Each structure stands twice: as structure tokens, then as C-alpha cells.
Amino acid sequence: MTRTQIYLTDKQRAELAMIAKQFGKKQSEIIREAIDRFIDQTGQSRKETALREAAGIWKDRKDLPDFRAIRSEWDR
């Protein structure tokens, strides 16, 4: 692990101390868990955004084979 310093407001520090006490964990553990959740949430959001932006990007291309015809041959 890499040591990192952050600045917290007095309110954030007090709330963090109460949460850590409530769950019986160190404040650093609570911070790491919160960061992991945030990374997971934003990572999923980036994937969904990329998929939405990619949808239909080939719809107007004329140089592609007829995929429906090819697929219908597989369904025999």
C-alpha cells in the first residue's frame, strides 16, 4: 500500500470517526472501502457510456457484408 495524506473538513472527520467506531474498523479502512465503491461505480458508468456511444456507429457503412444473410445460413 502507498501512504497518502488527505484533508478532511471537521464534519467529515467527525462523521468518519463515528462510522469507524460503529463498524469497529479503522478510519483508513473506511476510506479505502469508500474509494473502492466509488471506483467500481464510476468504472461501470464509463463502460455503459462507452457502449451507448458505440451503439449504431456502423449503421451507415456500405462496405460490410450482409450479416442477416450470413446469419440465416447458420440457422438452417
Image (cartoon, rainbow, N blue to C red):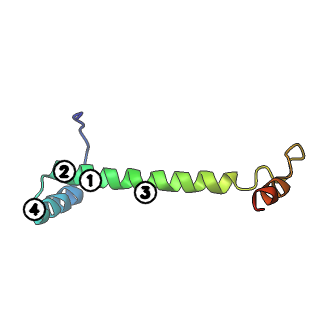
Residue 63 shown left or right of residue 71 in the figure:
right
How many marks are shown on the rendered structure? Answer: 4
**Which of 42 and 51 lies nearest the eye of the viewer?**
51
The local crowd at label 2, few if under 14, some if 14 to 19, many if 20 or more residues have their Cα within 10 Å, is few
Q: Which residue is mark 2?
A: 29
Work out how far the residue at label 1 is from the one at label 3, CA to CA, in angstroms: 12 Å
Q: Nearer the viewer, mark 4 or mark 3?
A: 3
Asked if the residue under mark 2 is in contact with the one under mark 4, i.e. CB atoms within 8 Å, the reply is no
Name above or below for residue 21 compared with residue 66. below
* Amino acid at circle 4: Lys
Residue 22 quadrant: bottom left
Residue drawn 9% across the image and 60% down it: 24
Work out how far the residue at label 4 is from the one at label 2, CA to CA, in angstroms: 12 Å
Q: Which residue is mark 3?
A: 41
Q: Which residue is mark 1?
A: 33
Q: Which residue is mark 4?
A: 21
Mark closer to the chain start, 1 or 4? 4
Asked if the residue under mark 2 is in contact with the one under mark 1, i.e. CB atoms within 8 Å, the reply is yes
